[in-house]
Amino acid sequence: MSGLIAALGRQPRGLLVLEGFLWIAILGVLDYFAPPDLSFLIFYVAPVLFLVWFVGRWAGLLGAFASAAFWTYEDVLSPHAYPSTGVADWNIAVRLVFLALFVWVVADLKRVLQREKQAEQERLERDVRIAQEVQARLFPRMAPQIPNLQCQGVCRPARGIAGDYYDFVTLDGGHAGIAVADVAGKGLPAALLMASLQAALRSLVSRANEAPAVLARDLNAQLCELTEPTRFATLFWGVFDERGRTLNYVNAGHNAPLLMRKAGAVDRLAAGGRPLGVFPDSEYRMDSVSLAAGDVLVVYTDGVTEAPDAEEREFGEERLLESVRANEDRPVDEICRGVLKAVDAYQAGLPQQDDMTLVVARVT
C-alpha cells in the first residue's frame, strides 16, 4: 500500500487532477442511472480525498464543486429533477458543504502529519550528525608516524555513519598495529558494533603486541558475548616490526589484503580464521611476511571491490590493483584518493551502496 501511495505521489500533478475528475465523472454517470432514493454521497468522498491528498486543498475544493455541478444537473435540470426546487437546492448545498468541510479537515490533517514527519526527519538528521562527529573521533585524525612505514586510511560511509573501521596503533618495542574491520550491515546498528569493536581492540592490544592470533581470539570471545551470531565482523590485524621490517598478521574472515611487491608480484594475506562474533570456540592462526622497501600494502573492505556499475558488474580486485599501480609513485594519501576516484568513475554517478574503507601502507 505504501508503495502505491509513493508511486501516485510521483505522478505529474496535472495527471492526478485528471484522474480525480475522471472518477467524479464516472460517479456522476452511475449516480444518474441509479434509483433516485439511492445516495451516492459517500462515494464522492473517495475522489475528493484523492485530489486533496495528492494535489492539494484547491484541487479537493474544485472536486467538491464539480460533484455539486453533477448534482445540480441531476436534481434540477434532468428528467430526474426534484418537484420542489427548494428541496433540491437544500440537498445540493448540504452535500457541497459536507465535502468542503471534508476537504478542509483532510488538508489540515495532511499538513500536521507533514510537519510531524519533517520534525522527525530533522531530529534524525541531527542525531546522525552527532553520531558522525562521535565516530569521526574514533578514526585516526592524522597519518601515524611509523618509522620505515608510510600509512594512510580513509573511510567513506554509505549512510552517514559507517560500520567499517580502521585504526593505527603505536605499540611497545618498536611495533605498530594496523587494523581494518567490516561490521555486518550498515547504518547506526553497524556503527554501534564498530565502536564496541574499536574499544575492545584498544583495550586488548597491549597484551598482544606480537601475537595477533591471541588478539583475534579474545576479540571473538567478547563479540560473541555482546552480539547475536548475525551481527558479526571481519577483521584484519597486522603488527609491523619497525626494525625487522616484518608484518605479523591475522585475517578473521576479512577480504585478503594485497601486498604489492616492488618487483611486481602480489601476495594475498588470507591466513587467520573465521569472522568475529559467530563461533565462541573459533581458533585463529597468525602468519608472517617479510617486507622490503617499496612494497605497498592495500587493506580494504568489500564496499570498494563490490561497488557495482549500471549493469551490476563489480569493480573487482583487478581494477583495485590497477588503480593502486597507476598511483603507486605518489604519496599514500593520493593513492587512497586515486582508488576512490576510480571507483566513483566506474559507478558513473550511482549511489554508494556500502561503506568503503581503504588503508594503504608503503615500506620506506
Image (spheres, rainbow, N blue to C red):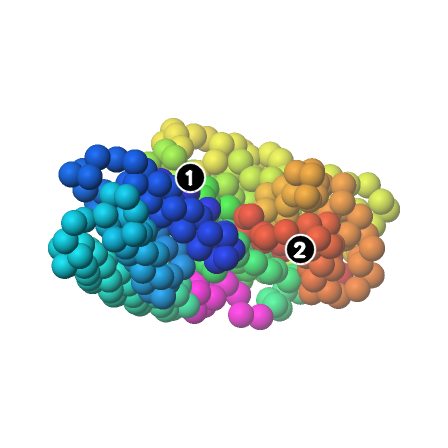
Give the residue at x 53% y 65%.
140
Q: Is residue 195 visible?
A: no
Is 203 a magenta residue?
A: no
Q: Start and end of the magenta stretch?
A: 131-142
Question: 24 or 296, which is in the foreground?
Answer: 24
Which quadrant would the C terminus be assigned to in this image?
Answer: bottom right
Looking at the image, residue 317 sits to the left or right of residue 251; the answer is right
Q: Is residue 338 visible?
A: yes
Mark number displayed over residue 348: none
Mark number displayed over residue 349: 2
Give the residue at x 83% y 55%.
326
Question: Mark 1, mark 2: which one is toward the viewer?
Answer: 2
Question: 317 or 196, which is in the foreground?
Answer: 317
| Disc 1/disc 2 C-alpha distance (Å) | 30 Å
Quadrant position of residue 243: bottom right
Question: 19 or 170, which is in the foreground?
Answer: 19
Q: According to the image, label 1 marks what residue? A: 232
How packed mark 2 is, by other alpha carbons closer than 10 Å (few <14, some 14-19, many 20 or more), is few
How far across and down, in percent of the image, does residue 25 sit? 38, 46
How packed mark 1 is, by other alpha carbons closer than 10 Å (few <14, some 14-19, many 20 or more), is many
Q: Disc 2 residue type?
A: Gly
Quadrant position of residue 195: bottom left
Question: 120 or 57, which is in the foreground?
Answer: 57
Which quadrant would the N terminus be assigned to in this image?
Answer: top left
Please tell me whether mark 2 sits on a helix, a strand or a loop: loop
How far across and down, in percent of the image, does residue 180 sit? 55, 50
Q: Disc 1 residue type?
A: Phe
Give the residue at x 82% y 61%.
329
Quadrant position of residue 65: bottom left
